[in-house]
Amino acid sequence: MLDFEGLRAEAWCSLEARIAWDSEEAAGNAFDFALVGFDFLAADGSGLDLDHVPGLARSLLDPHSAWIPGPAYQPEGSERTRTASLRIAFRVPAPARNLAVTIRSWRNTRPFTIADATLRQGFDAAEAAEERPRRWLGPAAEPLRLALVLGSGLVLRGQIHAARPDEHAARARIAYAHSDGAPIAPPYPDTVSVPGFGAVINLGAHQQARRFTLNLKPPSDAAFVDVAFERWEDAPAETRVELLAAPEIALEDRLRLESLCGDEVLQAPAFLVRLTAALGLPPGAESAWISPPVTGAPRILLAQRALQGPAGPAGPAAAPAGDALALRLAGAPDWPLPRAPDWREDPFRSVPWRLDYQSLAWLTALSGEAGRALALDLALSWSRANSWGQPADPLSLHPDALATRADVLGALLAGPVEAEAARVLVGEIARHGFAIAEIVGQNTLGRSLLQMRAAGALLGIARTLPRLPLSAYWDALARFALAEGFSAPLAEPSLHRRLELLTLGRALAAALDGEAPGPAIAESVAAALPGLTALLDPGGRLPPFGDSPPGIDHGAWLGRLSAVQGPVAARGAEAPRPGARPDAEGRTLSARAEGAERGWSHFACTFAGQSPQDHADCGSFVFAAQSRRWIVEAGGSEQAETGPARHYLLSPGPTTSRCRTGGSRRPGAGA
């Protein structure tokens, strides 16, 4: 463990050290060879629960972390001395002043040594613009409105930071309402009624940083709760208090997925029975949740796929091949699906292939009456083989697979389904709803496309099962997460991922149909599209910085989003001038030339900020001349996921090393 004091807020820092490893180390090819944990502290030493630190990933063992790659990823020549230099760059978030660093063993098989650890700070903080939005508390605030589950309490967790400790640093103002919106007058349990304020819960700060937990116990007839985090009016004007991150939201423990399932192996119909009892409803009440099916519920993730159009060779597809069904997933060759799959299949030893397979997205390619019947049979087979707590393939619990599969199951439920099959589908969708709600409510994957996809799936589940007592709560939770987090991933270094987010935004805005935050999301998408379109090269491809799958026609994709016919029209008037900064963040430079005889040329360079999915600590560029791409990115960085999502990857998959000095020189290679 290493301690550093006197950090400058909002300044870039570099943690530098040397690592030495054993000659018999067997985990040299591990991308996550060792783990460096970062715990940022206030000036008085109290820990800060920050939702994002540029350059680092949120993690479970430490608040934030970064991986040390194994010896095979270290610079050439280090294998002779078995030592290498380490450098981890990050931006110190306000209001942090101190830092505790923990270096942990992870996949290494022999001890390693860290020496000469130092922390270098960059330019003065006054020259830096804050990246993290500050949630300063005033004497009045717009309340957060959440729907309640009948008979259940609500738990909100968060942290405030005060410029100086104060017994009355802030307050949470609470107000309950009936289903028709009519307010319920206080007093409420575990609150204090204050004239002029209503019901409040005091949030004292005996240290600068104070974690709080609000265990809300609503009146029996309450359907909604409004929670406003505010500063007491009589606090000194110079005392500033902020909410460090959006609060975590969860139901009380008895309605968590782990509590509902316990140690038993529950099939989907049995889960519905267990849920009925947990809600205090009479036996058989779950029948009202099942029929008649809802046909107009949004399938947001499936709509996103439709807007993306043909996804190239990596897109999931299923087609008859004789008596079998041939699957083409994650760019792998066709694979014949067994007549009775056990859902443990992994023919290509590929994590991306397994993710596509377990998401069941390929079921949507089966059309016609026979195709639908087959899709339904396969979905029921998957449910039988994946009782909660004993998945056939642990990768099926990956957030992206969970979210996509929930959309697919909802689409199957919307068609003609026999009663017993409907019961299985509803039970399975409800289980997915609980799992995704916990991911969304805890902000597990905050500031990421994955978190937004999970929120979109939760919104679809809530509207697929409107008679489920939790549907209103899930709907409100999903919309809160989308309002809080949609704009953050727009700074994603990977332009391809940014385009995926904008496509998801279009699908979300259409599904919300004027409801908040749909209009705000639509406005963000409309503002970001022209800048992204301007970065296309004349061949219709975005510069492949960060993760960029091969074979994607970004020009046609952007053309569909921009409601312009074809990639040429989409690129027409938006072509950047040499040296222009077409993206809103000013992180990418682009220049191009077109000639009838010599073909087109294109150059793009990025100075994107540090991130776990980005380069270690450098810029990058791509270059094409005479219509031939000469210097391109390696791409595919997501094959080695970091942060909380990685904890769902319980088996090894292929990884690719990242280039530390810019583009990789591969003449004529595709992006």
Image (cartoon, helix red, strand yellow):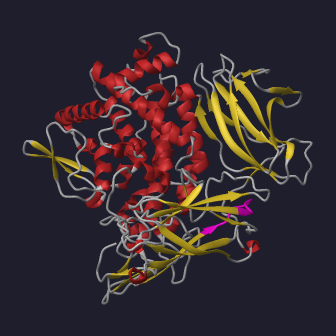
**How far across and how far down the image is residue 327, in percent?**
20, 49
Taking depth in this image into account, of 629 and 425 the one nearest to the observer is 425
The outermost residue toward the bottom is 597
Q: Is residue 115 above or below residue 144?
A: below
Left or right: residue 246 compared with residue 97:
left
**How far across and how far down the image is residue 78, in percent?**
42, 81
Q: Quadrant of residue 388?
A: top left
Q: Quadrant of residue 632?
A: bottom left
Left or right: residue 642 compared with residue 266:
right
Q: Main secondary structure of the magenta part?
A: loop
Residue at the image position 43 percent from the left and 27 percent from the top: 261
**How far across and how far down the image is residue 203, in percent?**
79, 39
Taking depth in this image into account, of 449 and 77 the one nearest to the observer is 77
The outermost residue toward the top is 282
* Quadrant of the image containing the C terminus: bottom left
Residue numbers of the magenta segment: 90-98
Q: Is residue 502 above or below residue 664?
A: above
Left or right: residue 211 compared with residue 528:
right
* Residue 337 in sight in this render: yes
* Residue 582 in sight in this render: no
Q: Is residue 274 above or below residue 327?
A: above
* Residue 95 among magenta residues: yes
**How far across and how far down the image is residue 362, in percent?**
27, 45
Residue at the image position 63 percent from the left and 21 percent from the top: 179
Taking depth in this image into account, of 373 and 503 the one nearest to the observer is 373
